Image (tube, grey):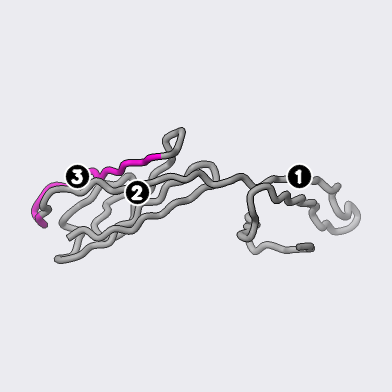
């Protein structure tokens, strides 16, 4: 894969890498006269293997719409450190995992938990009834 590539934002994501693949990125900015272009900066990155991890959401007891908000919990197996955990979905009051039954719908409510560990992202979707 060769460029040049222009990105619409500040990030360039390459999804097709295998463990051990190396990517060299050469960056420079295009400038106007009299200064012209900047010097070129190079960086080489090597793809690492994603850890085999398991996550499960702790099942809360029966939840009623009049109940007070409460924190949802997860069990994480297989990661050496604690990842950043972000929650979203129906009934989630904030991304730390506070579930507010008054924000949820009657019946099934789908929540997602997202773990971010360096550059590894895992998502689990779960229905709360």
Q: Quadrant of the N terminus?
A: bottom right
Question: Which numbered dot is residue 95?
Answer: 2
Q: Residue visible at 79% across and 51% down?
A: 26
Q: Residue visible at 61% across and 59% down?
A: 15
State the image coordinates of residue 122 (x, y, percent, origin top left): 44, 51
Q: Magenta segment: does it hold 119?
A: no
Q: Relative to the observer, which residue lies in front, 1 or 49?
A: 49
Q: In the picture provided, is 105 more to the left or to the right than 29? A: left
- Quarter location, residue 75: top left
State the image coordinates of residue 112 (x, y, percent, origin top left): 34, 56
Magenta range is 64-77
Q: Relative to the observer, which residue lies in front, 50 or 2?
A: 50
User: Reading the chain from its start, which is encountered first: label 3 or label 2?
Assistant: 3
Element on which disc 1 rests: strand
Q: In the picture provided, is 47 more to the left or to the right than 81? A: right
2 or 1: mark nearer the eye: 1
- Quarter location, residue 108: bottom left
C-beta proximity under 8 Å, tags 2 and 1? no
Question: Which numbered dot is residue 43?
Answer: 1
Q: Relative to the observer, which residue lies in front, 66 or 35?
A: 66
Q: Is residue 114 above or below residue 106?
A: above
Q: Residue visible at 64% across and 54% down?
A: 18
Q: Quadrant of the C terminus?
A: bottom left
Q: Residue visible at 38% across and 48% down?
A: 86
Q: Is residue 105 above or below residue 35?
A: below
Residue picked out by circle 3: 70
Label 2 environment density (alpha carbons within 10 Å; few <14, some 14–19, many ≥20): some
Q: Magenta segment: does it hold 67?
A: yes
1 or 3: mark nearer the eye: 1
C-beta proximity under 8 Å, tags 1 and 3? no
Q: Is residue 8 above or below residue 25?
A: below
Element on which disc 2 rests: loop
């Amino acid at each position: 894969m060769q460029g040049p590539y222009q990105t619409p934002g500040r990030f360039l994501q390459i999804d097709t890498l295998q463990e051990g693949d190396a990517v060299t990125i050469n960056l420079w900015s295009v400038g106007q006269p009299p200064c012209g272009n900047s010097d070129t900066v190079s960086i080489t990155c090597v793809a690492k293997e994603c850890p085999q991890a398991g996550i499960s959401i702790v099942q809360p007891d029966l939840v009623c719409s009049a109940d007070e908000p409460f924190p949802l919990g997860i069990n994480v197996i297989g990661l050496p450190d604690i990842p950043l955990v972000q929650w979203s979905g129906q009934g989630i009051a904030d991304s730390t995992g506070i579930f507010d039954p008054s924000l949820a719908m009657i019946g099934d409510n789908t929540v997602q938990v997202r773990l971010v560990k360096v550059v590894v992202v895992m998502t689990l979707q779960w229905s709360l009834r």
